[in-house]
Amino acid sequence: MALVASAVAREAGPPPAPAHAHRVPLGLMLVEQGCLTGEQLRDALHGQRRAADEAAARPRLGEWLIAHGLLSEMELTRTLAAQWSCPVISLDGFRAGETASAMPPFLAEACGVLPLRLVEGRLLYLAFAGRVDRSLCYAVERMTGLRVTAGLVPDAEFAAVRRRYREVAAPRVRCLEAASSEALARSAAKLIEREKPADARLARIHEYYWLRLWRRAPGSALLPAAGNVEDILCTVGHRFGESG
């Protein structure tokens, strides 16, 4: 119980500071890279505001520019990658069955990511659409023992490949809702005591706690077989689907 309580307390603390906390606004980057003129940016921002007045939601700047023929999806992706200090990566070589156990599908959906490919058994590529979730990258590194490289892909390509990912068998997932960190520690400790896994690890991604249990000891930095692990997704103080 003490070890589990210590792990929950560690994860409940403030997350580590992001490596790139400051990002130049997208519009300014598009002008700096020659994708837009200053006048086009001003017109686009006015168009965004008009669209927001006419609809319930304000469109994202990139979406507005693409819809009005002022920007290609690849130009947007390259600029976003520069904004997030990450590469644009190719979806070539995606084999969903080899990476399905990298994370629970729920987290992949929530964070807009695909576990893309494993290189030389040590490096895992994660493909994001629109933005990179550093919290998820950090959690996957800790959970798997792999180095993670994150990059962006165009939205349309991401959506097409995600359909294939959803069809692949992933590790079993259970959900656990707790009223407090202390209650989570007690429930997790009881679960571990009952299941008696060969190994157990805990990581936090935003409002979710990800507990992974291994039926057999994990290998040396390789992704486990889907049948060798079980994932428990936990929340504290709210139910799944509610905002944190």
Image: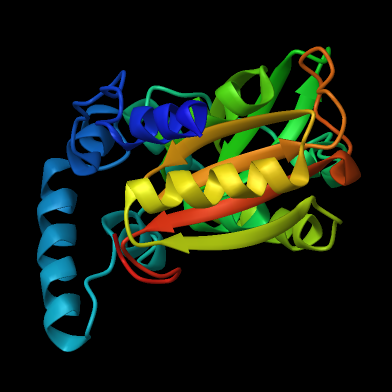
Vertical position of residue 95 compared to residue 138: above or below: below
Seen in the image, is 90 located left or right of residue 75? right
**Can the viewer see residue 153?**
no
Residue 110 or 49: which is nearer the viewer?
110
Residue 18 or 101: which is nearer the viewer?
101
The number of discs equals: 0
Visual colour scheme: rainbow
**Which residue is painted at 83% across and 63% down in the image?**
167
**Which residue is painted at 68% across and 48% down in the image?**
231
Q: Quadrant of the C terminus?
A: bottom left
**Which residue is painted at 29% across and 32% down in the image?**
34
Vertical position of residue 66 compared to residue 2: above or below: below
The percent coordinates of residue 232 (x first, y second) are 62, 51
Seen in the image, is 221 located left or right of residue 30? right
Res 102 quadrant in image: top right
Residue 128 or 202: which is nearer the viewer?
202
Res 121 quadrant in image: top right
Seen in the image, is 58 located left or right of residue 133? left
The percent coordinates of residue 238 (x first, y second) are 34, 66
**Can the viewer see residue 237?**
yes
Vertical position of residue 147 compared to residue 232: above or below: above
The percent coordinates of residue 33 (x first, y second) are 30, 28
The percent coordinates of residue 242 (x first, y second) are 35, 71
Vertical position of residue 137 compared to residue 170: above or below: above
